[in-house]
């Protein structure tokens, strides 16, 4: 049994199929990359998994249990956390409180220890301990993305969905971000990441899934993907970033 | 840490400043304890939906009366002439504000008397407070069947105005029964006023074997009367009663005229009793009945008062042919009662109110004390100059079936004039 | 709030002043200023309504205009259960029943409508006031043939102490919500509802629950006030101004800290009082409206926010001076 | 049959006027993103200006010539001064919407208060074409026919303006997506102010038509704002045909309930509003 499994997942937006008949799976401990051109349905797929949208038709199973009719907060509490393509932080709240929300509500009973210490640990883990009491909106984009990661990790997830956390970062920040993903993997968290930064994808991922026009067109190891004809066709004309 | 302290001290100081300033503000308002003047308080709708009564209701009359009294040096209280001062607060027809105002008038300004607030619902709020503070409340506009049983326990409240079962509707039903009316359509405002008139009308009709073909309630913000008038045309009643306010009565009249609905008798009120009705509708008003009623023909005193009051209220349009006479009578009675008591002591004056007849423009005037002689007072039927009026040649004629009658009742009413 | 490491010194500093204010207020009826009791009751009503309004709307940004509806439910509870004649429950029982009823109504309304965004929620809640007014008015006058109802009169002191009690409860509830994880959740909803949901916050439940709690508090004020105005009909119970006033008072006072709404409420109800007795009521709405627009344009943090900013600047200037 | 005709035609005539009232609000909220609670107050002001002019002997339809441009300018300036300021200071559209609505509340109080200071709070009414015409067994008011025809005419003219002129197209673009329209070279603040101005002008004209048919008072505004809100929710925001269809539906429902129990007419409109918000929040013509 896979940790997470999607069967024939489909959703329409006003007659247009944003995700159409996609099957996917996740096994414990892997890092999976989700790539594809803009508008391919990657974020929509995340929305379907995290409960922001409901597939119709299709079903999503987490540890063999159907989750595709569950509200977002329940899915989060079961162990699937996510970040957002356009950062959605609690801007007027200090960084600590951002993370605390995840811990108090997402982890919901999973933590018996002192919450304040746990928040501190998480902030150290993502490298934000020195700005803990700053209002989140005053931070740089790179830092704000890390708040999202910390908040997601605070919910003690088994699966973490990262939506373009490396977009718009400078080379130093990029390296730091890649390190962070590896550290998360070492913690035993299964990671799915949407990314346009090919270097990162190829460097970290165990497996890559390619979406185009809402359909899965390829799946395999980084090597297999780079040589896949269909994928090259889709990316033809795009830069090799 | 300073932030925390600041958080607390600032509001504290602000509160303190407010409290102190309110002390300062209020200390200049009092001073009624030494009897150098007679203080009368009133919480009135000066700016709210009933503000119109400040121009054509009780207010212009008591203001003129105070001016007149003061011009003569004041009221004689035990050999000393004391001027009258009015303290008028605004409640904008908000019950909570009215209650607060009355409390302030009684407990802070220590007024000797209260004039009633604007409208019946406000009266309900004001009367218990006045009674609790043992201050005589002389009600102007408003009065209701619902108030009657309560008056038994409110010795300080005196309501002067006539209303539904006191004695307008019984008189009206006598009139239409005598003319052989068989069916009635009732349209009433869905508030206290409308509901009372509706209930009284229904029970009076029941006693006389007149059928009520429809009793329809309307909301205060109604604009479209076509449905009502169309339905009434289909049911074709002998009598149509409209128990609503001028806001509704005026558009109803227009609709009835436009759709040519002309029952044998049309009773409209309140509103029909005001001078602006003939100004708005002219000849079309001929034969339309309203609640009231008095006019210059009622008596010599009434004629003199009508002539005197017209310029006071700002012209013929603001003449009130329902209540003006009784409001004035309240004032004339008050002056005589104070003079007779010879003191401003409330209990002494109350005793005069309970026992004494005075002559006012109504003629012999006295109070019908409720609760077996220990409650508040209503004006008895004999004192009124009339109950039902009908517009005839621009005059609001009293058409009651008794000595008050100034003209015969026209039934059926003439057709609407051709437009 | 973490109970293990409470800073007692700080706590005493936070609570000393409120306790002094409370004591001063509790002794109010003994000052011999008779009208003061009424006046301060008037203040308390608006303070409670405003603070309860901020409890939900301030944190989440959902503008509720249903205050008058819940206040009206309180008034009608008093009219039905604490009438002048006939069977009457003790006032405290009426307050509890009314709070429960209001909680229930708000819970249902909230569950249906709190997914509506922005303006629609505001209009819906305002419509609720009109709907309740129309339907209750219709049922009362046209079906039951009622001509208004009468509530048993209570003494001014009783009313004042009840209001003071409700005020204390309101403040405690507000403090509690602010300092527990639910306060944090409510704020996160106000900041970003999606992110809150995906962080495990049961967004709908938190919103509906707090909305219902604030509604329950609002209705208790209505119960107490009904024993003062005594005469109850639909138009006195459901007055739209009761919806607008708390929102404005809160915006004017500032919603960032606990005192802002209370200060706003006191100032505005006092202004209203002065205008009323000075017969300048005509200008109340004009002043009300102008201040509202000016506050939104130039003072988005409200009066308390402004004061705090000024203070910070003053402190900053002082520091700069000593450094230089 | 007579009842059906009464409800249907009577409802259409009222609905025509309602649709003009709501069209202005639809523009102001649908495009300029300001939920103008004071919309009904603008209408009330228009009604009173008309009343005042007709009392001087002017035909009550003539004042529209003055009212429309005057109200347009007032609306335009208001948007440029108050609402643009709020828009600039708001971190996101959601905050702008709620602050804009609160400011509109302020406006509502101010406008109503000024009107009360000038005209008091008593109702005014006058008779204009107060006669009836018959269709089959039913009679209808001539003044309502004139007003409804006028409203439909104004609506049509405005619809043509939106679909065929440059400014009209800019407005429609802004309605779809103001950010993109801004990028395409549309002066977005100007266009939004334009919309607000048009909304105010329509409110003014609607006031004139209301004044011809119904009694007016300084406190009547909010009631019409509520009805207009229901209509634009029903019809779909920013949609002119939507406002028309919504107006006619509400007109008929309103009249029908008025025949049954006038006390529940506004409540009925509100129930429709609730059901609609829950079932189809986009409205009939909404996208």
Image (cartoon, helix red, strand yellow):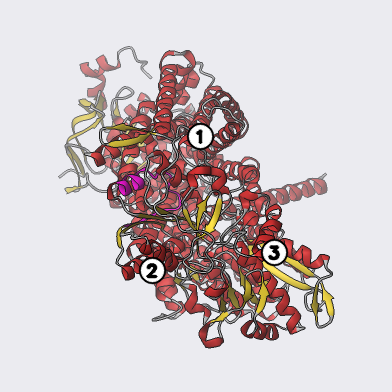
Q: What element carries label 3?
A: helix
Tags 1 and 2 on a common chain: no
What is the distance, in whole Å, between disc 1 and disc 2 at their CAs? 44 Å
Quarter holding the C terminus of chain C is top right
Q: Where is residue D130 in the image (x, y as percent from the top left)?
A: 44, 35
Please identify, in this view, whether the residue under mark 3 or under mark 2 is nearer the observer: 3
Q: Residue placed at 40% from the left, 31% from the top? A: D142
The residue that label 2 is drawn on is C100
Q: Is mark 1 on a helix, strand or loop?
A: helix
Q: Mark 2 lies on which chain?
A: C
Task: Between residue C212 and residue D90, name the one nearer to us.
Answer: C212
Task: Between residue B407 and residue D206, name the one nearer to us.
Answer: B407
What is the distance, in whole Å, between disc 1 and disc 3 at their CAs? 38 Å
Q: Which region is colored magenta?
A: B214-233
The residue that label 1 is drawn on is D207
Tags 3 and 2 on a common chain: no
Q: Mark 3 lies on which chain?
A: B
Q: Is residue D273 magenta?
A: no
Q: Residue placed at 58% from the left, 71% from the top? A: B160
The residue that label 3 is drawn on is B62
Quadrant in which residue D65 is drawn: top right
Residue B31 seen in this snapshot? yes
Q: Position of residue C227 (x, y in %)?
A: 51, 73
């Amino acid at each position: 049994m896979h940790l997470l499994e999607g069967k024939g997942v489909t959703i329409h937006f006003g007659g247009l199929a944003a995700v159409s008949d996609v099957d996917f799976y996740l096994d414990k401990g892997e890092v999976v990359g989700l790539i594809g051109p803009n508008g391919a349905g990657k974020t929509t797929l995340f929305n379907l998994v995290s409960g922001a949208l409901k597939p119709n038709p299709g079903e999503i199973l987490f540890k063999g249990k159907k989750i595709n009719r569950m509200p977002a907060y329940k899915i989060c509490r079961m162990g699937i956390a996510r970040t957002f393509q356009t950062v959605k932080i609690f801007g007027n709240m200090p960084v600590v409180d951002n993370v605390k929300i995840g811990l108090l509500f997402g982890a919901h009973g999973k933590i018996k220890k002192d919450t304040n210490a746990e928040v501190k640990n998480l902030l150290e883990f993502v490298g934000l301990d020195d700005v803990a009491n700053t209002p989140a909106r005053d931070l740089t984009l790179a830092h704000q993305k890390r708040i999202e990661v910390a908040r997601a990790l605070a919910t003690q997830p088994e699966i973490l969905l990262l939506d373009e956390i490396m977009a718009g970062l400078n080379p130093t920040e990029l390296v730091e971000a890649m390190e962070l993903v590896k550290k998360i993997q070492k913690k035993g968290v299964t990671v799915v990441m949407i990314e346009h930064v090919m270097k990162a994808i190829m460097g970290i991922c165990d497996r890559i899934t390619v979406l185009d026009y809402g359909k899965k067109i390829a799946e395999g190891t980084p090597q297999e993907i780079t040589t896949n004809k269909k994928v090259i066709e889709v990316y033809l004309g795009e830069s090799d970033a | 840490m300073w932030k925390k302290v600041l958080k607390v001290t600032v509001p504290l100081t602000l509160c303190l400043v407010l409290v102190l300033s309110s002390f300062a503000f209020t200390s200049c308002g009092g001073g009624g304890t030494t009897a150098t003047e007679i203080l009368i308080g009133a919480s009135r709708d000066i700016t709210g939906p009933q503000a119109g009564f400040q121009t054509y209701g009780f207010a212009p009359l008591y203001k003129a009366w105070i001016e007149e009294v003061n011009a003569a040096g004041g009221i004689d209280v035990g050999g000393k002439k004391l001027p009258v001062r009015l303290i008028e607060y605004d409640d904008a027809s908000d019950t909570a504000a009215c209650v607060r105002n009355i409390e302030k008038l009684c407990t802070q300004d220590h007024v000797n008397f209260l004039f009633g607030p604007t409208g019946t619902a406000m009266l309900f709020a004001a009367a218990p407070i006045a009674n609790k503070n043992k201050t005589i409340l002389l009600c102007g506009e408003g009065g209701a069947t619902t108030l009657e049983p309560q008056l038994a326990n409110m010795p300080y409240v005196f309501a002067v105005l006539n209303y539904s079962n006191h004695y307008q509707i019984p008189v009206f039903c006598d009139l239409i029964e005598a003319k052989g009316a068989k069916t009635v359509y009732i349209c009433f405002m869905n508030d206290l006023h409308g509901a009372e008139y509706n209930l009284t009308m229904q029970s009076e009709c029941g006693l006389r074997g007149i059928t009520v073909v429809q009793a329809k309630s309307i909301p205060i913000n109604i604009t479209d009367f076509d449905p009502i008038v169309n339905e009434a045309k289909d049911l074709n009643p002998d009598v149509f009663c409209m128990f609503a306010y001028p806001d509704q009565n005026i558009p109803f009249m227009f609709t009835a005229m436009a759709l040519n609905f002309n029952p044998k008798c049309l009773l409209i009120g309140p509103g029909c009793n005001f001078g602006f009705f003939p100004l708005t509708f002219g000849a079309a008003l001929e034969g339309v009945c309203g609640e009231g009623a008095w006019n210059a023909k009622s008596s010599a005193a009434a004629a003199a008062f009508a002539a005197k009051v017209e310029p006071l209220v700002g012209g013929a349009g603001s003449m009130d042919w329902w209540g003006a006479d009784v409001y004035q009578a309240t004032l004339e009675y008050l002056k005589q009662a104070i003079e007779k008591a010879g003191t401003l002591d409330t209990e002494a004056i109350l005793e005069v109110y309970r026992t004494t007849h005075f002559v006012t423009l109504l003629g012999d005037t006295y109070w019908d004390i409720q609760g077996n002689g220990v409650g508040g007072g209503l004006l008895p039927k004999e004192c009124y100059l009339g109950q039902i009026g009908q517009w005839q040649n621009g005059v609001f004629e009293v058409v009651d079936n008794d000595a008050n009658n100034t003209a015969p009742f026209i039934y059926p009413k003439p057709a609407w004039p051709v437009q | 709030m973490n109970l293990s490491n409470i800073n007692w010194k700080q706590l005493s500093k936070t609570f000393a002043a409120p306790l002094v204010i409370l004591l001063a207020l509790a002794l109010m009826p003994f000052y011999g200023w008779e009208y003061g009791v009424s006046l301060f009751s008037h203040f308390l009503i608006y303070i409670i309504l405003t603070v309860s309004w901020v409890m939900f709307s301030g944190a989440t940004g959902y503008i509720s205009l249903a205050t008058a509806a819940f206040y009206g439910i309180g008034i009608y509870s008093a009219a039905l259960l604490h009438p002048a004649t006939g069977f009457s429950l003790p006032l405290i029982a009426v307050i509890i029943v009314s709070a429960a009823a209001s909680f229930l109504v708000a819970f249902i309304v909230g569950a249906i409508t709190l997914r509506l965004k922005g303006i629609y929620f505001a209009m819906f809640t305002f419509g609720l006031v009109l709907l309740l007014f129309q339907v209750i008015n219709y049922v009362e006058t046209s079906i039951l043939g009622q001509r208004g109802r009468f509530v048993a009169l209570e003494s001014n002191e009783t009313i004042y102490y009840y209001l003071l009690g409700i005020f204390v409860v309101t403040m405690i509830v507000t403090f509690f919500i602010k300092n527990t994880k639910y306060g944090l959740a409510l704020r996160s909803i106000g900041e970003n509802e999606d992110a809150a949901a995906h962080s495990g916050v049961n967004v709908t439940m938190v919103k509906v629950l707090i909305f219902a709690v604030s509604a329950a508090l609002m209705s208790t004020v209505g119960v107490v006030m009904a024993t003062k105005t005594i005469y109850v009909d639909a138009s006195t119970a459901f007055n739209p101004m009761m919806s607008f006033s708390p929102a404005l008072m809160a915006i004017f006072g500032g919603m960032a800290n606990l005192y802002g709404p209370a200060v706003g409420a006191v100032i505005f109800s006092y202004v209203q009082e002065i205008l009323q007795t000075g017969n300048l009521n005509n200008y109340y709405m004009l002043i009300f409206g102008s201040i509202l627009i000016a506050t939104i344009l130039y003072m988005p943090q409200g009066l308390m926010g402004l004061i705090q900013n000024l203070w910070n600047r003053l402190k900053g200037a002082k520091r700069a001076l000593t450094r230089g | 049959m007579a009842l059906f005709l009464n409800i249907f035609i009577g409802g259409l005539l009222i609905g025509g006027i309602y649709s003009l009232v709501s069209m202005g609000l639809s523009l102001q909220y649908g495009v300029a993103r300001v939920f103008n609670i004071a919309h009904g107050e603008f209408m009330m002001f228009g009604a009173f200006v008309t009343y005042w002019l007709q009392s001087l002997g002017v035909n009550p339809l003539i004042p529209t010539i003055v009212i429309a441009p005057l109200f347009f300018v007032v609306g335009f300036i208001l948007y440029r001064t108050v609402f643009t300021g709020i828009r600039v200071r708001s971190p996101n559209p959601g905050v702008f919407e709620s602050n804009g609505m609160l400011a509109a509340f302020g406006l509502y109080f101010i406008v109503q208060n000024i009107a009360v200071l000038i005209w008091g709070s008593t109702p005014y009414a006058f008779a204009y074409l107060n006669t009836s015409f018959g269709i089959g067994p039913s009679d209808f008011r001539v003044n309502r026919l004139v007003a409804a025809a006028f409203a439909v005419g104004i609506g049509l003219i405005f619809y043509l303006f939106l679909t065929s002129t440059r400014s009209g197209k800019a407005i429609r673009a802004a309605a779809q997506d103001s950010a993109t329209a801004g990028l395409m070279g549309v002066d977005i603040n100007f266009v939004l102010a334009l919309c607000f101005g048009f909304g105010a002008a329509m409110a003014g004209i609607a006031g004139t038509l209301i004044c011809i048919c119904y009694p007016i008072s300084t406190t009547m505004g909010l009631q019409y704002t509520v009805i207009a809100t229901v209509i634009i929710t029903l019809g779909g925001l920013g949609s002119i045909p939507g406002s028309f269809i919504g107006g006619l539906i509400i007109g008929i429902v309103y009249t029908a309930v008025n025949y049954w129990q006038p006390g529940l007419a506004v409540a009925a409109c509100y129930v429709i509003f609730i059901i609609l918000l829950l079932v189809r929040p986009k409205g009939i013509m909404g996208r």
